Every structure is written in C-alpha cells, then in structure tokens.
Image (cartoon, rainbow, N blue to C red):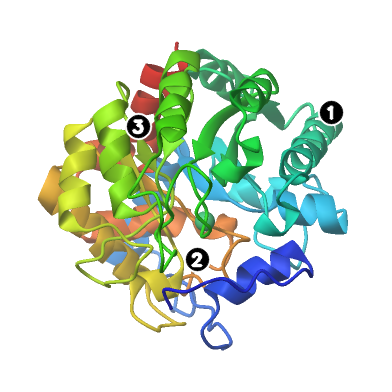
Amino acid sequence: MRLLAQYIPQSPRLVKRTIETLTLTLFVSLSACEGRHEPPASLEPLPATSRHREALVLHQQAFVADLHNDILLAVLDEGHQLGDRHQDHDTDIPRLREGGIDAQVFAVWVSPSFLPDRAANRARDLIAVFDEQLARNPHDLGLALRAGDIARLNQQGKIAGILGIEGGHAIENKIENLRMFYDQGVRLVGITWNNSTDWADAAADATPSHDGLTEFGRQVIQEMNRLGMLIDISHAAATTVEDILVVSTHPIVASHSDAAALNPHFRNLTDDQIHAIARNGGVIGVNFFTAYLQANAREVPIDRLIDHIDHIVELAGPDHVALGSDFDGVPWTPTGLEDVAGMPRVTEALLQRGYSEEDIRKILGGNFLRVFRQVCGE
Ligand SMILES: [Zn+2]
C-alpha cells in the first residue's frame, strides 16, 4: 500500500476514494439509546440515558471544530448544495448543525491529474464554489480568516468555514500562488498529498527524491509563517515533517492522521512524530477512516477512534489532539459516525472513557482554536 501512483484521469472524487479503499461493506447503524424500553416514570433514568443527555448538552455547549472534510469536491463536480439535506454524501449544513460543528476546515483537494499547469486553477475553482455556497447560505455559513472571525460567526449562529488546500502542488512551484491563495482566504495548506511535490516528499512516495524539503520547500514554509497560514503535515513524509519542524517558527497541524503505534499505516504518525508535534505546540486531528484506525478494517466501533485519542493523550497530554474526520474523502467511518451528524457520539464516547469535561472541550475544538489563533491571528 505504499505505492499510490494510480492517478487515473476519471472523477477526482472516485480516484481519491479508490486510493483509500480496501474492501466494501455495509454499515450497521446503531444508537446507544435506541431500542431500550422506557423506564416507568417513577424510576430514575438509566445511567446510559443520563450520560447520553449529558453528552448532548456538553457537545452543544462546547466549541466543536473538524480539521478535514472533502465535501467541496462534490459541490464542484456534482453540484451538491450545502444548504439542502442529502441522503448521499456525509456533509451538508443541516447535518453540520446536527453534528454541533462550529468550525469546519473545507479541503481544497487538488488531484495530481491536474498537474503540471492546471492545479492552481483547479484550486481556484474549488474556492469559487465555496464562495458561491457562502453567498447562498449567508445565515448559516461564513468564512473565517482569523480567530476573531470564528467567535463572531458563532455568536451570529453561523458555522465558521476555513479553507485548506490539500496538496502543495496546487501552488505550481510559485510563491506568488501561495500569496494569491492567502488573499483568496486560504488559511491552511497540506504540504503534500499522496504525491511528492517538486519541493517536498510525501509519505506515500516509495521513491522519495528530496530527503524532505528542498530549498524552495523551506521558502514555502517561511512564507507560510510570515503570512500566517497553518502548515498541515498529514500525508507528508517523515523527513519532510522533520525539516518543517526545524524551519517553522509556528505550531503545525496534522489535520487528519492517526497513531501508527495502533496501526502502522504510512498515513499515521509515529510516537516520535506525536512527541515532536506536541513540543512544537501543534495539534493532531484524528482521522475517522476505519482503515487508518485499524489495519484493513471497514467496520470499527467509535471506541477504536477513542483508542487513538487516548494514545496521543498518553504520549502528549490533552493539549495536542483534535478531530479531523475526513468525511466525504473516505469510504468507511466508525459505526454510529456514518456522517457529520454523528459527531455528538464522539463526546459521548469520551465521557464514557472517563475524560473530564475540560479535556473533552480541548479535544473537540479548544486545541485547534489555540493553534489557529496563534498562527492566523486574533
Ligand atoms: Zn487526505
């Protein structure tokens, strides 16, 4: 699974899903509180029911951020409307509301099939459809450029949308394009996707050629520091991550990656990398993809996701973990977390695991907000 060079020129969404795909199954939908008999009115509610209620209240009150969602591909390629509730896909505004999401990073994923000279345009097209969705849903969604925007939008009852490019090849080797994307509202860049760029090696590249970052790659990192953009190392090679940690003066993020100690997949982070990101002050968004959570798995319980959160917390404490669902970018997510509406079940599972309310608030969004404020400004 290390070699991922099948850049088939078909639907980019299909290409991405194919790459993440191992086998296919049907989800079994279950809810912790469904199917129980109601207790007689005179009895105390069942403990599970009160925990469920406690979780819903905490989830609703807490600031909840998700660091990676791929729905913009469907918006551009299929005309998916964020304002309407859908039976297909994982994400729309009604379900983001149900999921209690307060800030969502929308991935601007640029398929390498658009290389060499249509990658920047492809990113612009994705940004343009996001802008169109903002205009169509002015009461529900707004663009966040800095931390204050998130607070303002949330106070107005809106979801804060953050634009994040996935795949540094989108800048087509030009610092001017990085600045252009910043001016268009992009505040996060995934340094590589599965393909290495001309200036940074990817984790999926079986024959990396740069030993991390090139000199130009270092300039990109410095410019992102100067502009105030989040550096996202999910998908990047270990050597690239090491170089970034040397160059960057700001905390970095791994927007959608899990712990390699629990599943040694090339997309997951080693304990050394988790320690290094924590020392850097950064944050790791755990990915919901079942095959990253457990080797070759297509059905896993939400508890398995909590295992990865636990591992990162055990290594680095509660200040460096967040949520990076990868909804609409992967075919299988844990049972009960089939779409973004299931997010409150993460809070319920964290409570069940014994996490304090304070730590749950950090994991749900507090940690990401800290880093976003530090890098993108107040
Ligand atoms: Zn990804």
Q: Is residue 241 above or below residue 193?
A: above
Left or right: 355, with 330 as reference point: left
Q: What residue is pinned by disc 3? A: 366
Q: In the rendered structure, find residue 91 and report the number of the disc placed on it.
A: none
- How packed mark 3 is, by other alpha carbons closer than 10 Å (few <14, some 14-19, many 20 or more), is many
Which badge, 3 or 1, comes first in the chain's sequence? Answer: 1
| Image location of residue 47, percent across then percent down | 27, 64
| Image location of residue 346, percent across then percent down | 39, 57
Q: What residue is pinned by disc 2? A: 337
User: Residue at image x 36%, y 63%?
Assistant: 49
Q: Is residue 80 visible?
A: no
Q: Is residue 305 above or below residue 174?
A: below
Circle 1 SS class? helix
Circle 2 SS class? loop
Closer to the camera in the image, 54 or 151: 151
Disc 1 marks a residue whose amino acid type is Ala
Which badge, 1 or 2, comes first in the chain's sequence? Answer: 1
Label 1 vs label 2: CA separation? 29 Å
Return the residue found at the far left: 314
Which badge, 3 or 2, comes first in the chain's sequence? Answer: 2
Q: What residue is pinned by disc 1? A: 135
Closer to the camera in the image, 154 or 204: 204
Label 3 vs label 2: CA separation? 21 Å
User: Residue at image x 87%, y 53%?
Assistant: 79
